[in-house]
Image: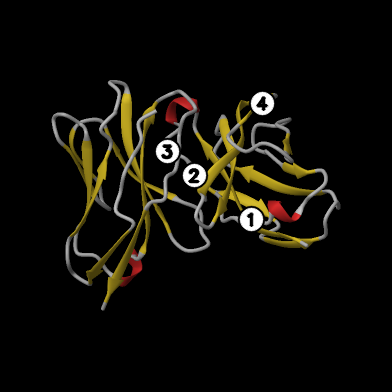
Amino acid sequence: LAKTTQPISMDSYEGQEVNITCSHNNIATNDYITWYQQFPSQGPRFIIQGYKTKVTNEVASLFIPADRKSSTLSLPRVSLSDTAVYYCLVGDIPNNDMRFGAGTRLTVKP
Amino acid sequence: EAQVTQNPRYLITVTGKKLTVTCSQNMNHEYMSWYRQDPGLGLRQIYYSMNVEVTDKGDVPEGYKVSRKEKRNFPLILESPSPNQTSLYFCASSLSQGQLYEQYFGPGTRLTVT
């Protein structure tokens, strides 16, 4: 199971692009990279998932370099409502080895 | 609306009094699981179920029981709650174990055991 490392916290301002990087040096060949968002007192919400290169959806983009030892979640033009904890998860599907780490607490300021 | 529901949302109880937290999903998902979330410890999996009548322990199963008699329901049972089970509990589901990383989480149940 690949261990992930993320910054504990980040601050940003409304309208800025935010990039949160996750390090996973021991990622295995079959591992996928998944990001979740969690607001206070709510359950985590799936944001995006990828295996390599770039994935984009209506919420975010996920950049994964060729060596896959890290990944970057990019949130375009954040607003106050993007203040949340963001979790990076790495693991093999379909094994039951999904683990949430401490996450990155993003605070968006006006 | 596709969702995972949990009841109750808030519960205060006393040590030793058996309780059940219900979880239901309306998405015909095969895979369901329970997590607890504690400050500084993050989300930890308690039990999971890959399908009806199939359950298995997660990382912190002690003191908990589950059952999966129907596909949509996955109740969490605390036979004799203790104060160290005071926590925020989340139920989650995914289409199958193959889509494990795309889980849908419920709104949470905040449990206090005195």
Chain ID of residue with mark 3? B
Helix, strand or loop under label 4: loop
Residue A91 appears anywhere in the view = yes
Label 2 and label 4: CA atoms lie apart by 18 Å
Chain ID of residue with mark 1? B
Please, is residue B17 above or below residue A52 in the view?
Answer: below
In the rendered image, residue A70, in percent from the top left (x then y), is placed at 22, 38
Kind of residue indicated by mark 3:
Glu
Residue B2 appears anywhere in the view = no
Kind of residue indicated by mark 4:
Val
Label 3 and label 2: CA atoms lie apart by 7 Å
Task: Residue lying at the far bottom in this picture: please name it.
Answer: A110
Which label sits in the foreground, 4 or 1? Answer: 1
Instruction: Return the residue at label 1.
Output: B87
Instruction: Return the residue at label 3.
Output: B102
In the rendered image, residue A105, in percent from the top left (x then y), is placed at 36, 60
Q: Residue B104 carries which label?
A: 2
Label 1 and label 2: CA atoms lie apart by 20 Å
* In the rendered image, residues at marks 1 and 3 fall on the same chain: yes
Quarter occupied by the C terminus of chain A? bottom left
Q: Residue A36 carries which label?
A: none
- B37 relative to A80 in the view: left or right: right
